[in-house]
């Protein structure tokens, strides 16, 4: 099934075409970063308008340059900005309906989770072994999932800010361009971090959940106290680089802290990381090193597929289609919340929840 993937959940309009084995035939992305940069964050209304302008152009290019006409359309239907999602979903639904081809709604986080299995050098997508222990860390989400035969189970998540959001907010105070994660990464590479500056949060319960808001406030306080506010990447000096190395280290330590216990409890065949923060140099190094220590293979996405892209959506759509998923273009809806399931699956989960606790999310969050 040659698949057209469409991703418009936030500030990037992305379109990709994969052949039936998940080989990337075409991918194009139109970034809106410059439009949002003056505001220091994504403006939802601007995002929707930009998607509306870019999407038809990108899809035309995909049809010209891909390996042939698509037989399946996969589109991100949540979570994300409602207006931005609606542009992609309505476009995809009309496209599929008009051509009489199948349509599959994809959860953006499922998309990130398949990104490590894609090949940017023209190879087929790798088949995931079971079970996979996967970290998703992006601008909007931070969670570990265990994916087995029955689908993903979330093992822990952030209680407040996401890891990427934490990088971005501290980067903004430092005067780095939006999004701040890549700039913090570059500064941290030139610095020497100290584990003692930022301590890991202690949650009152037994969970492995993350909390980044205290770290964010502490890092912003330090930036101000050291006179680094608004200095920008060029002028933060060695002190700024050292501080960012400590700050980055604290985020990475927290993200990886539960890993040894998860490995011991769930004996995964593979460990993955995905989402924009999976581009972070320290996170990649530490994860590889931990995989070696724990004796589990680590698979990371190519750098070009860590941030939002449509190839991952197309692949997640293909996998869902091969498990029997089809969505009705006349009824498809979007959902802005983190915990989101395509309409048919939501009903199926409600039935499941009546008998047993859902394997994916607590029922109150559906
Ligand atoms: O996955 P993504 O493109 O969008 C969401 O789904 O949120 O992730 C974007 C996030 C931003 O917060 C950005 O600062 C962060 O990924 N990011 C990084 C790096 N590259 C991107 N964070 C840390 N280090 C990086 N090298
Ligand atoms: Zn994302």
Image (cartoon, rainbow, N blue to C red):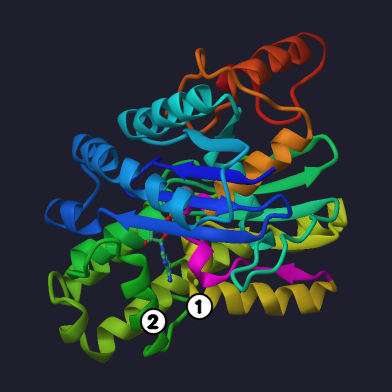
Q: Is residue 124 left or right of residue 222?
A: right
Residue sitting nearer the eye, 72 or 90: 72
Say if the magenta span includes residue 318: no
Q: Is residue 197 visible?
A: no
Q: Is mark 1 within 8 Å of ligand 1?
A: yes
Q: Which mark is residue 281?
A: 1
Give coordinates of residue 322: x percent, y percent: 77, 37
Residue sitting nearer the eye, 249 or 325: 325
Residue with the mark numbered 2: 188
Q: Is residue 283 visible?
A: yes
Q: Which mark is residue 8?
A: none
| Helix, strand or loop at mark 2 | helix
- For the point 64% across and 46% down, the residue is 2
Tell me the quadrant of the picture where the N terminus can be found: top right
- For the point 33% across and 41% down, the residue is 56
Say if the magenta span includes residue 300: yes
- For the point 36% across and 81% down, the residue is 186
Name the magenta segment's main secondary structure: loop
Residues packed near mark 1 inside 10 Å, few (<14), some (14 to 19) or many (20 plus): some
The span shown in magenta is: 296-310
1 and 2 marks in contact (CB < 8 Å): yes
Q: Quadrant of residue 272?
A: bottom right
| Helix, strand or loop at mark 1 | helix
């Amino acid at each position: 099934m040659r698949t057209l993937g469409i991703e418009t959940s936030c500030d990037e309009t992305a379109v990709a075409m994969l052949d039936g084995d998940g080989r990337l035939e075409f991918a194009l992305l139109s970034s809106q970063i410059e439009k949002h940069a003056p505001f220091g964050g994504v403006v939802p209304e601007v995002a929707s308008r930009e998607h509306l302008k870019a999407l038809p152009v990108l899809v035309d290019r995909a049809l010209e340059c891909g390996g042939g006409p698509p037989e399946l359309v996969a589109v991100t239907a949540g979570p994300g900005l409602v207006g931005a999602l609606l542009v992609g979903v309505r476009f995809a639904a009309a496209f599929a309906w008009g051509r009489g081809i199948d349509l599959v709604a994809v959860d953006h986080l499922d998309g990130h989770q398949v990104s490590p299995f894609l090949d940017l050098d023209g190879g087929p997508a790798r088949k995931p072994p079971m079970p996979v222990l996967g970290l998703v860390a992006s601008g909007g989400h931070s969670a570990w999932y265990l994916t087995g035969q029955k689908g993903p189970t979330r093992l822990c998540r952030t209680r407040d800010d996401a890891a990427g959001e934490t990088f971005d907010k501290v980067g903004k105070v430092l005067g780095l361009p939006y999004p701040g994660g890549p700039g913090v990464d570059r500064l941290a590479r030139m610095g020497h971090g100290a584990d003692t500056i930022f301590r890991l949060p202690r949650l009152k319960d037994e969970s492995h959940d993350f909390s980044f808001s205290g770290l964010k406030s502490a890092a912003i306080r330090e930036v101000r106290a050291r006179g680094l506010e608004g200095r920008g990447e060029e002028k933060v000096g060695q002190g700024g680089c050292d501080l960012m190395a400590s700050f980055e280290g604290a985020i990475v330590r927290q993200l990886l802290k539960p890993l040894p216990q998860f490995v011991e409890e769930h004996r995964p065949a593979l460990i993955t990381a995905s989402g924009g923060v999976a581009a972070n140099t320290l996170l990649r190094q530490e994860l590889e090193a931990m995989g070696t220590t724990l004796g589990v293979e680590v698979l990371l996405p190519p750098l070009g597929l860590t941030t939002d892209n449509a190839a991952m959506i197309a692949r997640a759509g293909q996998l869902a289609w091969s498990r029997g998923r089809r969505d009705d273009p006349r009824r498809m809806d979007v959902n802005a919340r983190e915990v989101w399931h395509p309409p048919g699956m939501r009903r199926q989960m409600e039935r499941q929840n009546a008998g047993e606790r859902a394997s994916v999310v607590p029922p109150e969050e559906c």
